[in-house]
């Protein structure tokens, strides 16, 4: 079968839409027709080389939703016509991590930047002539159709619009979970959300949903701050110094309970700014990625130890995708989580370059490719 996909041939590189050969689903696999795919900053990190991948060319995209078009042997719990959201970290349900409620850390995720089948470094489903093409996060949602391991999709109810559901497969769960699960936001907390992109806006929603007394959004872009105020933030500032002062003014000088860092290109300095904004025994949640070669967070060990502060990494919102994707969609149904409002601009697959230009220019909360 043929499909059209956005690939990068070399890094640093640009997304290029090409026609590829797509394999039919083998044992344990499904073929999905994409309806929508979100333009997450992590795919840009792949294109720039900040996030090194093993296979080039690589078909990008890890946030998406679609309809099952074919089901391979040994798949007994999905049928043609089912609606699915991609989970950018596959979930085996059996490893040590899955068994302990840490599905986002499933051992199958180890190969997520390889581009091959999870668990089989020699096996590919996309081909450009004789050349194997990787699939970002084992899925490659910047494709009209893609063949994936069954464990990379989560079945959802058909009444949920797939364009909105797509966002849950990365941005929503990652941001919401960063505030709720990784940060442990509690009723009345003061929470700073640093960076209001597709991830950070959902940290705002998560903190508000968890009952934070104050949700302080920080972004240099005015449009992002306005959106944050619409979706649950109680205050918004252009920089962390103002957010820190505001958090202190609300807490008798102590500082925020939680600061979630979702800056597009996150550096050690950003984490240090968040660290300076939290109270004793407060938590900085680091979600954003930067160049892998970056080392070091310039914080004082004294302040870490004597104030018993915590710096917590967060992958996929420390969530359990099999349980939390349907749960997030239930929150959407009941109006407790906004999804439609997160989509600023819709693009065709061929407009993907424009989509990433708009992301860099701060024009989108989330851009979405609609197929
Ligand atoms: N840990 C995970 O599981 C996970 C999952 C998905 C994405 N990510 C990462 O999260 C980050 C955010 O992704 P996104 O898709 O929301 O990106 P985005 O580009 O949509 O949003 C980033 C935001 O950061 C803002 N920003 C830039 N400098 C800032 C500063 N100094 N202070 C405050 N805000 C600042 C930008 O204006 C922008 O609004 C990326 O690094 C991405 O790779 C991590
Ligand atoms: Zn993502
Ligand atoms: Zn597992």
Image (spheres, rainbow, N blue to C red):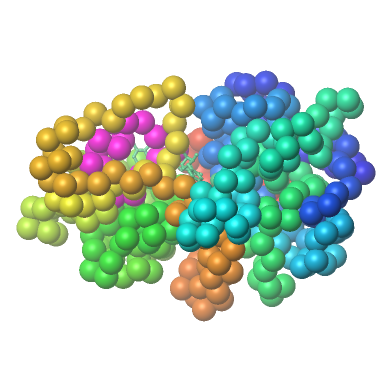
Which segment did they paint magenta? 259-275
Residue 232 rendering spot, x and y as whole percentages:
37, 64
Q: Please tell me whether residue 274 belongs to the stretch shown in magenta.
A: yes
Using the image, determine if residue 262 lies above or below residue 293. Answer: below
- Residue 339 can be seen, yes or no: no
The x and y percentages for residue 17 are: 77, 34
Q: Is residue 84 visible?
A: yes
Q: Quadrant of residue 293?
A: top left
Residue at figure coordinates x 60%, y 57% from the top left? 94
Give whichever of 362, 209 is nearer the camera: 209
Location of residue 117 in the rendering, given as x and y in whole percent from the top left corner: 73, 40
Question: Residue 122, relative to residue 262: is it above or below?
Answer: above
Taking the spot 24% from the left edge, 29% from the top edge, the residue there is 298
For this orientation, the residue located farthest to the left is 252
In the figure, is residue 262 to the left or right of 298? right
Question: Which residue reaches farthest bottom?
Answer: 334
Residue for point 61% across, 54% down: 91
Quarter of the picture for ligand 1? top left
**Camera-side residue of 96 and 308:** 96
Q: Quadrant of residue 1?
A: top right
Please state if 327 lies on the left or on the right of 159 as rendered: left
Residue 296: which quarter of the image?
top left
Residue 129 left/right relative to 346: right
Measuring from the top left, give residue 304's x and y in whole percent: 18, 40
Residue drawn at point x = 47 percent, y = 41 percent:
362
**292 drawn magenta:** no
Count of numbered labels shown in the rendering: 0
Q: Is residue 361 left or right of residue 161?
A: left
In the displayed orientation, state which residue is furthest to the right: 1
């Amino acid at each position: 079968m043929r499909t059209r996909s956005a690939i990068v041939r070399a890094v640093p590189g640009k997304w290029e839409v090409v026609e590829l050969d797509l394999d039919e689903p083998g044992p344990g696999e499904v073929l999905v027709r994409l309806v929508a795919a979100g333009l997450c900053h992590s795919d840009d990190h792949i294109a720039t080389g900040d996030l090194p991948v093993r296979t080039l060319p690589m078909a990008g995209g890890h946030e998406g939703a679609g309809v099952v078009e074919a089901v391979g042997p040994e798949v007994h719990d999905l049928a043609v016509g089912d609606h699915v959201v991609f989970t950018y970290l596959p979930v085996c349900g059996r490893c040590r991590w899955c068994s302990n409620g840490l599905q986002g850390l499933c051992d199958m995720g180890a190969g997520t930047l390889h581009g091959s089948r999870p668990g089989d470094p020699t096996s590919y489903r996309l081909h450009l002539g004789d050349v194997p093409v990787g699939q970002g996060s084992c899925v490659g949602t910047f494709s009209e159709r893609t063949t994936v391991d069954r464990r990379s999709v989560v079945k959802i109810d058909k009444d949920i619009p797939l364009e909105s559901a797509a966002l849950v497969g990365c941005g929503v769960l990652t941001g919401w979970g960063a505030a709720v699960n990784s940060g442990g936001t509690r009723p009345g907390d003061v929470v700073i959300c640093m960076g209001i992109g597709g991830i950070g806006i959902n940290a705002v929603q998560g903190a508000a949903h968890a009952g934070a007394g104050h949700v302080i959004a920080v972004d240099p872009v005015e449009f992002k701050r306005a959106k944050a105020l619409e979706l649950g933030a109680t205050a918004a500032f252009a920089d962390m110094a103002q957010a820190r002062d505001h958090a202190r003014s609300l807490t008798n000088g102590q500082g925020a309970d939680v600061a979630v860092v979702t800056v597009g290109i996150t550096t050690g300095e950003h984490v240090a700014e968040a660290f300076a904004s939290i109270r004793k025994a407060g938590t900085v949640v680091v979600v954003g990625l930067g160049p892998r070669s970056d080392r070091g967070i310039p914080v004082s060990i004294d302040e870490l130890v004597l104030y018993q502060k915590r710096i917590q990494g967060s992958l996929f919102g420390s969530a359990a995708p099999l349980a939390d994707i349907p749960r997030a969609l239930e929150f959407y149904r009941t109006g407790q989580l906004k999804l439609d409002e997160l989509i600023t601009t819709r693009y065709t697959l061929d407009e993907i370059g424009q989509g990433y230009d708009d992301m860099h220019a701060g024009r989108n909360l989330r851009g979405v490719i609609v197929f």
